[in-house]
Amino acid sequence: MKRKDTKALPFSKRLDKQVPEYGELKIVIADAIYVPQVLPLTILEQIESELTFINPKYKDALKYGRSLQGIQREIKLFGKIESEKQNKNRRKNQSKNQSKNQTNDPSVIQTVIRLPRGYSNRLLEIFHEQSINYTLEDQRLSKNNITYNSQIDLYEYQLPIVKEAFQKEQGVIESPCGSGKTVMAIYLLSLCQEKTLWVTHTLDLLRQSTKQLAKNLNLQPHDIGTIGAGQYRISDTVTVGLVQSLIKHKEQLVREGFGTVIVDEAHRVPSETFRSVVDPLPAKYRFGITATAQRKDGLEPILFNTIGPMVGKIEEKDLLQAEKIIIPRAVPIFTNFYTKVQEPYSTLMTALIKDEERNHFLAEKVLQHLKDQDCGLLISERIEHCYIIADLLKTMQTSLSVVVLTGKTERLQREENIQKARDGKIQLIVATRVADEGLDIPRLNKLFLATPSRAVSKVKQQVGRIMRTHPDKKEAFVFDFIDYRIPVLQNQVKIRSKLYQQLGCPIS
């Protein structure tokens, strides 16, 4: 019988051979951090506390009186593992009511503790504070055997951040729209010289990433592996995978020998789907790139504990100084919308998008501010609303070139419309949240926020769509429709106004 290659397995599956008997404290870093010996109970409780988070879904369900069935109250990033030998000994000793290694000190836990990779700095900090001696064994996967032919020349504001990330070996890079996040990540993986898995979550981003990787690494598109869209094709260099497909093959991925993992739109890592894909991979290098690490639900610590700490951040001022972005002017437009039914929030939104007076007012303002040479983006939270507004605009001005982009738009149609917008053949794109990520149209110069939002990270991404420079673009505007007669929506305005100030947007 062929022997199983235990090195291809997650460290947690190899504990019988790797974990020494009770004695010296040794830390192993692989797919996660393993403390396979003893820890004082007080320290264990501290670690558990720092790696336990209230589940936002549970909190919302409790707040709004929805069923809590099937929703975990807490998200825990730690685990306790016993090797099979330890299990056998425990069962044997339980039957004899004694243990060979039993201690009279109840504050000592004999176990193997699995902690997320990004927690390593904090763990060592705790050990230093408590004067705990340890040895560190690195079992991360690294072959360092690939030379990439990178065609990239980084800008001055990019290079120090990429070098810092490479030296730290894991962590998150936060960089605004238009700052070259993808290019920085490609340069970074070329420094690592490892077989790479690039994780993304939409077909559009998969195709964009594949195209960028091939271009900047002097490869052909077929040289880039693909997991998703009905394919499971691993490349010897870089493979781009859809997280929805990766999760179906997560055990196989551990055996594919990836030495670098890069997560695009890394602010999504706190979701269970992303974490279950990234967390088991023992790659030496683990990076995340995102326009903003901030999340509405406050779960940023899960991102950093899974990927690693923030290793670099590009500010809008850096891009402005390098003439890589345009700071838009924020223009508030006050509606007269009012409804007596303001709770729950979903009912309020339904009333808002179906209010004929507000929709006509919105369409009139769009036509007033959208000029022939402009390329505008109107964003609504509801698909139905997108079509209502688009139909209204076409009726009011038949010559207007307007298209609707939603998650239901067919791929070929979506790609064709995006290319037309890039070529200046479309004046207005009406879109849902699909515009929040991966909409690469530098020509966009006017943004219309047709529905309210208090999610700072989402609005920041949306504003970022019109901040890219383009030869035909001299200025940019955000038109924010404010429903001041609704108290809850008025409060959201304050949140967005603060964001505009942070971005340096003049407010008319």
Image: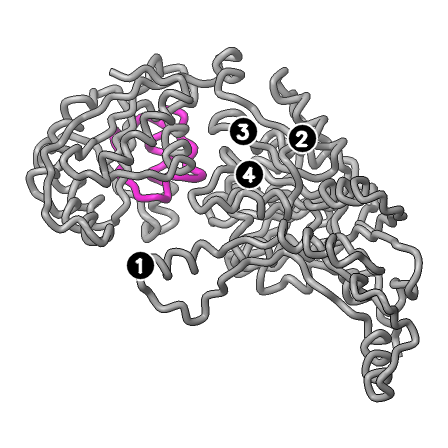
> Depth-wise, is mark 1 or mark 3 nearer the camera?
1
Q: Which mark is residue 128?
A: none
Q: Amino acid at mark 1?
A: Tyr
Q: Amino acid at mark 2?
A: Tyr
> Depth-wise, is mark 1 or mark 2 nearer the camera?
1
Residue beneath disc 2: 187
**Most foreground residue, 103 or 120:** 103
Quadrant of res 446? top left
Residue beneath disc 3: 175
Q: State yes or no: discs 4 and 2 in contact (Cβ < 8 Å).
A: no
Q: Amino acid at mark 3?
A: Ser
Q: Position of residue 260 (x, y in %)?
A: 71, 44
335 w.r.t. 259: above or below: above
Q: Position of residue 378 (x, y in %)?
A: 26, 34
Instruction: Tell me which numbered mark, 4 or 1, is placed earlier along the sequence.
Output: 1
- Circle 1 packing at 10 Å, graded few (<14), some (14-19), many (20+), is few
Instruction: Tell me which numbered mark, 1 or 3, is placed earlier along the sequence.
Output: 1
Q: Which residues are magenta?
A: 416-443
Q: Position of residue 114 (x, y in %)?
A: 73, 58
Identify the element where label 1 is drawn: loop
Q: Amino acid at mark 4?
A: Lys
Instruction: Tell me which numbered mark, 1 or 2, is placed earlier along the sequence.
Output: 1
Residue beneath disc 4: 211
Is residue 284 in the magenta section? no
Q: Residue at x 84, y 80 (%)?
A: 88
What is the distance, in whole Å, between disc 4 and disc 2 at their CAs?
Answer: 15 Å
Q: Residue at x 37, y 61 (%)?
A: 62
Q: Position of residue 395 (x, y in %)?
A: 8, 37
